[in-house]
Image: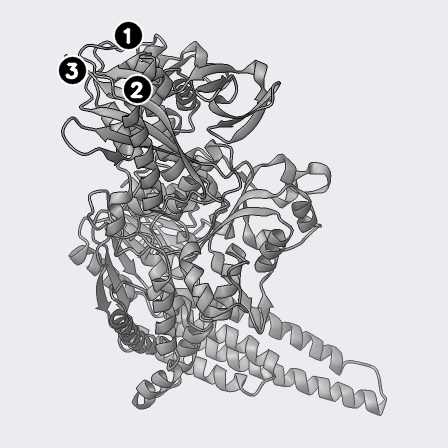
Amino acid sequence: MSSKQIHHPSFGQGSVLVNNGATLVVRFEHGIEEVLASEIRTTVTAEAALEEMSLGSPAEAVARVQAAAISSLNDAWGVFSRSRISLLPHQLWVCHRALREWPVRLLIADDVGLGKTVEAGLILWPLIARGVIRRLLILTPASLVEQWQFRMRQMFDIRLSIYQPELDQGKRDFWNVHQQVVASLPTMRLDRNDRHERLLDAPGWDMVIIDEAHHLHADESTGKTLGFQLIEKMKRLGKISSCVLFTATPHRGKDFGFWSLMSLVDADSFGPNKTHATMLKKLPERLIRNAKQKVVDMEGRRLFQPVLQFPETFQYLEEESEFYRMMTTFVASGKAYASTLSSQGRGQVMLVLIALQKLASSSVAAVRGALRTRLARIHDTAATLRFDANDVVSSGEETDDHDALMRWMAAERKRSLQLMDDEILHLEKLLFAAEKVVVESRVERVLEIIDKRFNEQSVLLFTEYKATQALIFSALMRRYGENSVGFINGDGRLNGVSYPDGRIASPSVAREDMAEKFNNGQIRFLISTEAGGEGIDLQQQCHCLIHVDLPWNPMRLHQRVGRVNRFGQTRQVQVVSLRNPDTVESRIWSKLEEKLGNIMRDLGAAMDEPEDLLQLVLGMTQPGLFDSLFQEGVDVPREGFDQWFDHKTQNFGGHEAVDTVVSLVGHAASFDLSGLKQVPRADLPDLEPFFLSMLRLNGKRPEANEDGISFVTPDAWRTLPSVLRRYERMAFCRDVKGKDAQSRILGVGHPLIDHALQQAKDFDVKVAAVSGLACILVICLAFERVTTGKGQVKRLLLGVEHPIDGEAKVVRDVDVLNTLNATKLQRPDKPEGIGLHLPALELIERSRRRVEFHIVETGFPFVAPAVAIHSILLPVSV
């Protein structure tokens, strides 16, 4: 059977490796199987068919090669996945890197906004479609669970079940019933009701994806977080086959934590106790980082422009200035009082003071509500103390010891009451001053900026607090109309909103609905808090952002801008930051910006190709630095402010941090322009010629219009109940609109495409004469002979073109597909042989050897590659 190939009814075509008489060991496309000899039929090889001059149907021959090229392309790049968004080179490159090896073990540290869910879906879809991944677990922050579920379904038709603790109890067997799950990492890390025991007793996971993986932290002093311990245990027990971690800030300032995180990716290569130099050499194999400055579209055009920053100032009105002065004095007095207390008492007082200080830096409205709440609580506590004091005084006990104890307790209560009365007095004065503030200059300045700088533009506004959010919401409605503005926050409710008609109400909204309205242009303004904006994409209609207030952590500013400066943004993002130069918060921010500018310059000088590494630098900052700056800054006199700030930040962004960032970036694999030529220019429209040809070969005539194609399903494809008898308006594009958009997109993984591919691969046509070809085209399949090899891509299609005049050359699968898509078969149902010149077998063998050399030269990850002739397509000269 050396010149014969076989066909199996379940596995398709293959080559016999061992003949055991009753059984045969056969290499099929998916791998090696032992099958009954009685179940197979023999077919001839392409070489034998050429030697026998056995030419088959050109339409079937072309379809068979197209199917092989489509599978080869999709297995390696995922280009034909059913994603609803256009794919970018860096995303396809990440997918290609991941699919080159199984199991997949990567940490992907792309900049925020480059489409991590797209990259995750691109990696998953080819593996799910081929059955490599059956059990999938995605762990995310709690606020992103539903977003991951929605995007995987919407973009890739991957259906994830959300983990719900109430369903994981007793005999419900959640982890065996559900094969593809998305779960909250904060929930999963807690071992409640024997949750971990059931998880670890269930079958292992083919793939685990962890979003915001920097929360899996290990510290040499404080130990490992619960999440880290859970993943480490799952890996140790063999419950995780492949693992992909996503985080934009993988290094948190300590090498111990970073190498511990990398050990979750590859424990054999990384760990805090392994040799640093050795780990750095291996890092590019496991760490990917793409920067916004480098990503491009398929034409090589940069996708992101530098963000335009516009610092704007405002001045307090007289009433606001007086309130701010009183609040500053109150906070300073509170700190002095806190210093006299025990550690626990001091901590409690400082928490209150810090909260008030943060609120005051946002708006008077924000701190006014907190003052009212604090005042009411102290009144209640004081009333209780007075009642208890009366009980002590009226006690009937008369012993000397008891009398002394009662006097001491009464004195303590009296002292506490005196302190509370003092605080009540200060709070009432503060509230009185706050009530005098009727107009807030910050809000008026926001309206001026919108009118002058962002006239008729959609604007995203960020604030830290809901009270400020309600203030801005009310002001925008008064100026621009009730239907012009929306909001998103943590609980979807906003109290104290003043409507243009004088009503005071508390509207409730779903953040997804508000985001959709904003993205669709139904509302012009959207006001978001940090909690509400997490994980929401708002770039479709908006490129203008206003920081109504400035958070104490610069990382939050970076994350705010990431809501609009992300994949899909087509305009240059403009950002306004608002501050009052007379406040201590403004002075600290000015110094921080100066410091960050110096750090960026140092990084630029240390790198061959400078890029924006601010997020990495901020991620490495020691915990609590920024909070301590703002807490202590209020007490520092102006004349010593610069010296104090420099001392506090002397280790922030120093030479050690710069060296760490440069080393990290320098040892991470990344996409750049030089890799653009490797990315195949293929997309869903390139499937259409093949699919239409397969419909015609099955005797079906598709109807085409501007909405897509409609057709009756061939009987041979109706093997599953999910396959319909007829399909309407099916499309080979990603921008399909409407609620049924996902079901109308045809791509690899759709049962119709999969049936068509399998049917075409089973065509028994190895040699054909095809009109429209310019030269002889020898199609080769390179495959991995070692079944235990790490490569996930087991086969690769390549062609060898033999022009009449000129040197033969190897062409990629995408070039083969493009060539065949362009052919116009004159007689697609019959062999063509007019003006045919048959090549010698020697030329076919030279083609095979040329492909063997090409595989080795290009470094494709085959351990022991072999090359077989798939098809021979001959040109026809009429």
Q: Residue at x 54, y 36 (%)?
A: 134
Q: Secondary structure at mark 1?
A: loop
Whole-number angstrom distance, CA of label 1 to CA of label 3: 16 Å
Please provide percent x and percent y for residue 528.
37, 54
* In the rendered image, the vertical position of residue 659 relative to residue 642, given as above or below: above
Q: Is residue 189 visible?
A: no
Q: Secondary structure at mark 3?
A: loop
Please state if 833 lies on the left or on the right of 96 as rendered.
left
Whole-number angstrom distance, CA of label 1 to CA of label 2: 12 Å
Please state if 194 lies on the left or on the right of 274 as rendered.
right
Please provide percent x and percent y for residue 242.
52, 46
Q: Residue at x 56, y 72 (%)?
A: 220
> For the residue marked with disc 3, what is the amino acid?
Ser
Please provide percent x and percent y for residue 91.
34, 45
- Closer to us: 830 or 253: 830
- Confirm or deny contact between disc 1 and disc 2 (CB under 8 A): no
Marker disc for residue 877 = 3
Disc 2 or 3, which lies upstream in sequence? 2
> For the residue marked with disc 1, what is the amino acid?
Lys
Say few, some or many: other residues with alpha carbon within 10 Å of mark 2 (under 14 / 14 to 19 / 20 or more): many
Mark nearest the camera among 1 and 3 is 3
Say few, some or many: other residues with alpha carbon within 10 Å of mark 1 (under 14 / 14 to 19 / 20 or more): some
Marker disc for residue 54 = none
* In the rendered image, the vertical position of residue 666 relative to residue 498, given as above or below: below
Please provide percent x and percent y for residue 554.
36, 67
> For the residue marked with disc 2, what is the amino acid?
Val
* In the rendered image, the vertical position of residue 435 relative to residue 50, given as above or below: below
User: Residue under circle 2?
Assistant: 62
Disc 1 or 2, which lies upstream in sequence? 2
Q: Residue at x 25, y 15 (%)?
A: 769
